[in-house]
Image: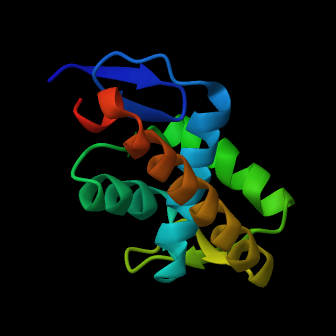
Amino acid sequence: MPVSYIRILYVREQSMIGAGIKRGTAELAVLSILEEGPLHGYEMARRIEEQTKGALRFTLAALYPMLYRMEQRRWIRGSWETSDNGRRRRCYRLTPAGREKLSPLRQEWSELFQALRRLKKVAHA
């Protein structure tokens, strides 16, 4: 199945996904994965790809600016840590504001998917 690059994440097949949908998908994925516990960027991208069976793949070049924006909104908090091999890396945690944002985001996506399922052509695609 061909993979096309779409700014923040890869999506299988060619598609015309709007910027708002891409951003919302990426934000939901990051907040959801951080709900499991703190992670650094590379591990975050790896787990999202693994848990979505490759449907969502973040490029690190796009992930870090998004993490910065989410940190500015106070949805996540980053702190520098030293790995076992002595290298510094930024580890991100979900904040209370991020938890508050996660619930309505999930609800919006749930409502969107329910609406799409009601469309006969989409339901049988």
Query: Residue 114 appears at what percent x and percent y?
Result: 46, 52
Quadrant for the N terminus, please.
top left
Q: Is residue 49 above or below residue 5?
A: below
* 124 lies left or right of 99: left
Query: Residue 55 appears at what percent x and percent y?
Result: 29, 43
Asked whether 98 or 41 is in front, the reply is: 98
Identify which residue is drawn at 68% across, 43% down. 65
Numbered-mark total:
0
* 118 lies left or right of 101: left
Asked whether 46 or 124 is in front, the reply is: 124
Q: Is residue 72 above or below residue 61?
A: below
Query: Residue 48 appears at what percent x and percent y?
Result: 37, 58
The image quarter containing residue 12 is top left
Asked whether 46 or 89 is in front, the reply is: 46
Query: Residue 11 appears at what percent x and percent y?
Result: 36, 31
* 12 lies left or right of 68: left
Identify which residue is drawn at 51% across, 69% down. 32
Identify which residue is drawn at 73% across, 68% down. 101
The image quarter containing residue 71 is bottom right
Quadrant for the C terminus, please.
top left
Q: Is residue 72 above or below residue 93?
A: above
* 24 lies left or right of 2: right
Q: Is residue 41 above or below residue 16?
A: below
**Which residue lies most toward the left here?**
1
What is the image's colouring?
A: rainbow
Identify which residue is drawn at 29% across, 55% down. 52
